Amino acid sequence: MARQLLQDRTPAAYAGVEGFARRHAKEDAGALAWLVAGYAHILDKNYVNAIDALNRAKPRAGDLGDYVNFYLGTAYYQSGRLAESVATLGGFDKAYPESLLTRDAHVAYANALVADGRAQDAVELLESDRQPVRADLELALGRAYEAAGHPAKALGIFRNLYFTMPLAWESTQVDGDLKKLAATPETKPPTFEEQKTRVDLLAKGKQYNQAANEYRNLLNEAGPSDGVAVQMAMAEALRHAGRDKEAKKALESMPELTPELQAERLFNLGEIARSANDNDAFLRNLEQLRQTAPTSSWLEQALLSAGNIYLLRHDYDRAIDSYRELQQRFPNGGRASYALWKATWLRLRQGRRADAEKGFEDLIGQYPTSGEVPAALYWRGRLAEEDGEPAKARAYYQKVSERFRNYYYGELARQQLKKLKSDSEPVHYALLDRVPPIDASTKISADAVPTDNLRVQKAKLLENGGLLDFSVRELRAAAEETKGNWLAPETARIYSDTGRYDMAIEVLKRPYWEALFPKPYWIDLKKFSSSNGLDPYLVAALIRQESEFNPSAVSRANAVGLMQLLPKVGKSVAKQEKMKHFSATQLFTPAVNLQLGTRYFRSMVDKFGGFEYALAAYNAGVDRVQDWQAQGKYRDVSEFVESIPFTETREYVQAILRNANVYRQLYGTP
């Protein structure tokens, strides 16, 4: 009931929780229910009802007294009952010396003190609590100084907020304060360095439109030595914001540049040309980069762009030339192994077997720890098998299977091994020794959760009330105290037990496999998968990739729910399923989403005749998959998958197939 209330906050949900609280008024569970109701009312900004609920929670609040008092004091303040807010929050430190809410309470208490005419008391409280820096505390302190008659100190705090924390919400709130205090004696205008710090942070935070505008304003104050750098930064922000015409104009009007800035300029001009499909202009900028900055990282990036352009246009010869040039010019760069892989793969697609075999071996030898090695090992094994060298093929397959067991190519290698006869002695190939083995010397196991820890006990109470964020915060503090490695699995358990599978996956890393590969909604998932002739584990892996089992997920494209269906697709499939009175909001219901999603995915499988093609179409669209299928013959579907030119789609298909196999290993027959 508590989770439902915090999620929906409907009258029925309030009635359920408050009814439970009244029935258990003499128990701790009743106090917890009143806390949940009070917090829900605060989320709804219904402070009068929040005060009533939280006051009802106080007598039996126990270990959760700090949460009750903090939110009660906050509700009093928000409803204008300042004396009661001050009285409630004033003794917080002494009453709850170990509370995680102490600094939050200080901010709330200080705001109440200022409103009650005791600004100097607020200043003294917050000044002693400024580290580590928090934007909300700084805003409260600045306003306390302002109310206490210390405008210079207030101005300093507001300026620091504005210029060094521009991504914080509080930074957006001080504009009026700064204007009001602009006439303060001895006030100095912001320095160029302050303004540049702010706009650089905006750009770093990907606030490109705002950054571009502020860089433009900053140009008027930049000296000769800084102006060029500011103009370059402005142009890049404009390009990232999609304002290519403005970016191009800024780049083309730049004065004489240093070699590195000229390389950056040419790269950006090339990217603008690429986005406009102006191939000739892109190539002109690339050639200038070769001539003027042959060792620049900007040339490295431009060569990757060139390879990708030619790949998408199916001009494999030029794509190979670009990738090879990148790898040869920058053999130790971060893109080198990828470039060598792409060049080698395209040679294989062209039927240049000898070149492909050498390329795979070069990649394994030169970049043995790179992400491209599993694919290189597998396809070198495939070529050896086709060349009538079963012993060599077996050696390569075994290496992939053992070293990359739970990878996409690990499973493919095991499938190939089953087809090979094992009547020959294993052969050792020194090249395979270059790939480092897994360090299996250390077994990782989670420590027991310290149930006698007071914060852990408090977290359990908060979990019982559906207050998951508060519960996890207490657990993190407990983990800092105990130094055990139990935090991640315990946090994942909380999220899993409360249906937040997306959060459970997010907080976990290996080896907590079952939490990383959960089976929620399993009855419906298995039912609808089976009725559509689908492997339930494949569907589970698809959902894991699409929404991480969050039934409320909504994508940027407005795809909805577990299987991320567009409303128009849901409507169409609902009609096929003869579902009456369908509405798009039903896609948030797991059973409905699974019913329609599995039916839609089945139609993709039927259309293309294979799961891999269907997955690719699910991600990239039907038209693109049909285009890729038309690009020559493929040995089998695995060659098609590796040939998908969109990295996102290729990795999407491989990840789902890999994860379906992990599900099978974990759970056996569905």
Image: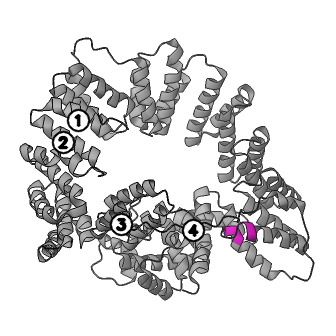
From the viewer's perspective, is residue 443 above or below residue 90? below
Specify whether residue 343 is painted magenta. no
Q: CA distance from mark 1 to mark 4?
A: 44 Å
Nearest-to-viewer mark from 4 and 3: 4
Quadrant in which the C terminus appears: bottom right
Q: Earlier in the sequence, mark 3 or mark 1?
A: 1
Q: Residues within 10 Å of mark 4 (few under 14, many from 20)?
A: few
Q: Amino acid at mark 1?
A: Leu
Quadrant in which the N terminus appears: bottom left
**Element assignment for label 4:** loop
Query: Quarter of the image holding residue 188?
Result: top left
Q: Are marks 4 and 3 in contact (CB under 8 Å)?
A: no
Nearest-to-viewer mark from 2 and 1: 1
Q: Which residue is mark 1?
A: 125
Q: Are marks 1 and 4 in contact (CB under 8 Å)?
A: no
Q: Which residue is mark 3?
A: 552
**Residue 110 versus residue 157: which sits nearer the camera?**
110
**Element assignment for label 2:** helix
Q: Earlier in the sequence, mark 1 or mark 4?
A: 1
Q: Give the magenta range.
A: 402-410
Q: Which residue is mark 2?
A: 109
Q: Looking at the picture, how far across and down is residue 50, in whole percent?
A: 13, 58
Q: CA distance from mark 3 to mark 1?
A: 42 Å
**Element assignment for label 3:** loop
Q: Amino acid at mark 2?
A: Tyr
Q: Looking at the picture, how far across and down is residue 446, in whole percent?
A: 53, 67
Nearest-to-viewer mark from 3 and 2: 2
Q: Looking at the picture, how far across and down is residue 468, in whole percent?
A: 33, 63
Q: Are marks 2 and 1 in contact (CB under 8 Å)?
A: yes
From the viewer's perspective, is residue 56 above or below residue 296? below
Q: Amino acid at mark 4?
A: Ser
